[in-house]
Image (tube, rainbow, N blue to C red):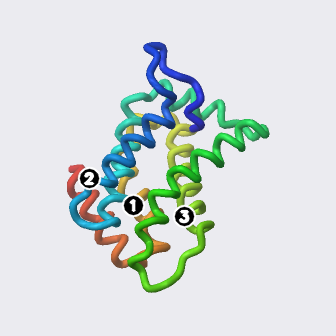
Amino acid sequence: MTGTPATPDGDAPLADRAYRAAAAAYLAAPHGWQAGVHAALAEVLDLLAREEEETVRCSVLATPTLAGMTERNRLVERFAGLLGPRTEATDVARPDILAEAVGESVLELIGSYVAERRVGELPDALPTATLLALTPFVGSDAAEELAGSASDQRR
């Protein structure tokens, strides 16, 4: 998903709308940065599922060309920024590349749903996305606990 094309009604590109929704959810989350990451992921997955046609179109445009890779890197760096600032609370220093790797893994998860023609089911990927995003920072037990609560809330 590069988000380059705008919707027919003139809205901002999908990636920009997704980032704004994610950032707002992240900042509004009441229970710490882990909940913020979870809320941001939920917003992005819900938006992409609602905008199924545009999500597919943006994913198709994210081909391995120089322009496509540049846009993908820009997108990952923006979303990785939501992980970086709040990692100060951990007792282990984390390199920036870790947040970018998390962004890439979530983007690949989304891409797999697109490839399988399951874009409408993206909200169901929230527990997996939460695990991917949080495990490197808080460990698997804490990430699984939040991912499990995410799964329970979706039922």
- Amino acid type, mark 3: Ala
* Vertical relation: 130 (above or below) 107: below
**Dot 2 amino acid type:** Ala
Residues marked 1 and 2 touching at CB (< 8 Å): no
Residue placed furthest toward the bottom: 91
Name the residue nearer the viewer: 45 or 99: 99
Residue linked to disc 2: 28
Which mark's residue is nearer the viewer, 1 or 3?
3
Q: Nearer the viewer, mark 3 or mark 2?
A: 2
Q: Is residue 121 visible?
A: yes
Q: Position of residue 90 (x, y in %)?
A: 42, 80
Q: Amino acid at mark 1?
A: Thr
Name the side, left or right, on which 4 lies relative to 39.
right
SS for tag 1? helix
- The answer, for residue 124, to whether it is visible in the render is no
Q: Please say if 49 is above or below 126.
A: above
Q: Residue furthest top?
A: 9
Q: Secondary structure at mark 2?
A: helix
- Measuring 59% from the left and 62% from the top, which residue is drawn there? 101
In this rendering, would 32 be left or right of 102?
left
- The answer for how far apart the CA atoms under marks 1 and 3 are is 13 Å
Of the image marks 1 and 3, the number of the one nearer the N terminus: 3
Q: What residue does disc 3 label?
A: 99
Q: Earlier in the sequence, mark 3 or mark 2?
A: 2
Task: Kindly identify which residue carries mark 1.
Answer: 130
Mark 1 and mark 2: Cα distance apart in space: 17 Å
